[in-house]
């Protein structure tokens, strides 16, 4: 899909934190169909603000911003720390989320490409990311960007009464 939307990818700033937190909770809400264990609580909202603030301060959170300064989406990049010595450096992309009305306009691809560049400049040899097996649109995007499956995570509920309402 061709788009005339003009935007740039930039480092997130602390004054973006409130909106980024709102967007991040939209991401969590959208992922509930794959994993509904996250509790929408004041405690978790406080933790998420701290988590996102840390990502911003450390230069790990990027946003897509339109010409009229509207934030359209976000993504994070971070070094993967293995407890053993490794012979190459892996970085992780996470939290890719675009506002619904701006999806399929190449924004996620541009964010990911910028995150890859940042990681490579910091010495990354490989990028990894995790996606829910049912998130077919994200899987399609990552395959288009030349990502290949590497790890399969299995899940088995041990309780039939997981709803705590």
Image (cartoon, rainbow, N blue to C red):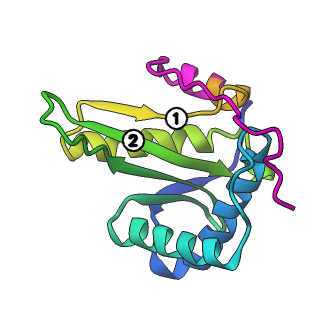
Q: Nearer the viewer, residue 5 or 149?
A: 149
Q: Can residue 83 be seen at all in this image of the molecule?
A: yes
Q: Nearer the viewer, residue 12 or 25?
A: 25
**Residue at image x 65%, y 23%?**
140
Residue underneath mark 1: 130
Residues tagged 2 and 1 counted as in contact (Cβ below 8 A): yes
Q: Earlier in the sequence, mark 2 or mark 1?
A: 2
Label 2's element?
strand
Location of residue 119 in the rendering, given as x and y in whole percent from the top left corner: 30, 43
**Residue at image x 74%, y 67%?**
40
Image-quadrant location for residue 25:
bottom right
Relative to 160, 116 lies left or right: left
Cα distance between the residues tagged 2 and 1: 8 Å
Location of residue 99 in the rendering, given as x and y in whole percent from the top left corner: 73, 54
Give the residue furthest to the right.
165
Relative to 81, 36 lies left or right: right
Quarter of the image with the N terminus is: top right
Magenta residues (range): 140-165
- Does the magenta stretch mainly form a helix, a strand or a loop? loop
**Residue at image x 62%, y 77%?**
43
Image-quadrant location for residue 141:
top right
Residue underneath mark 2: 92
Q: Residues within 10 Å of mark 1 (few under 14, many from 20)?
A: some
Quarter of the image with the C terminus is: bottom right
């Amino acid at each position: 899909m061709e788009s005339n939307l003009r935007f740039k990818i930039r480092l997130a700033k602390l004054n973006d934190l409130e909106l980024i937190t709102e967007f991040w909770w939209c991401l969590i809400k959208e992922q509930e169909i794959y994993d509904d264990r996250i509790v929408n609580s004041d405690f978790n909202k406080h933790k998420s603000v701290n988590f996102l603030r840390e990502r911003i301060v450390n230069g790990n959170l990027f946003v897509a911003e339109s010409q009229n300064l509207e934030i359209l989406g976000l993504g994070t990049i971070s070094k993967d720390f293995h407890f053993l010595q490794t012979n190459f450096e892996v970085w992780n992309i996470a939290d890719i989320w675009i506002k619904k009305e701006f999806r399929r306009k190449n924004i996620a691809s541009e964010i990911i490409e910028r995150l890859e560049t940042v990681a490579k400049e910091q010495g990354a040899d490989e990028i990894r990311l995790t996606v829910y097996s049912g998130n077919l649109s994200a899987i399609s995007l990552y395959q288009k960007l030349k990502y290949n499956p590497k790890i399969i995570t299995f899940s088995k509920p041990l309780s039939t009464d997981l709803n705590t309402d």
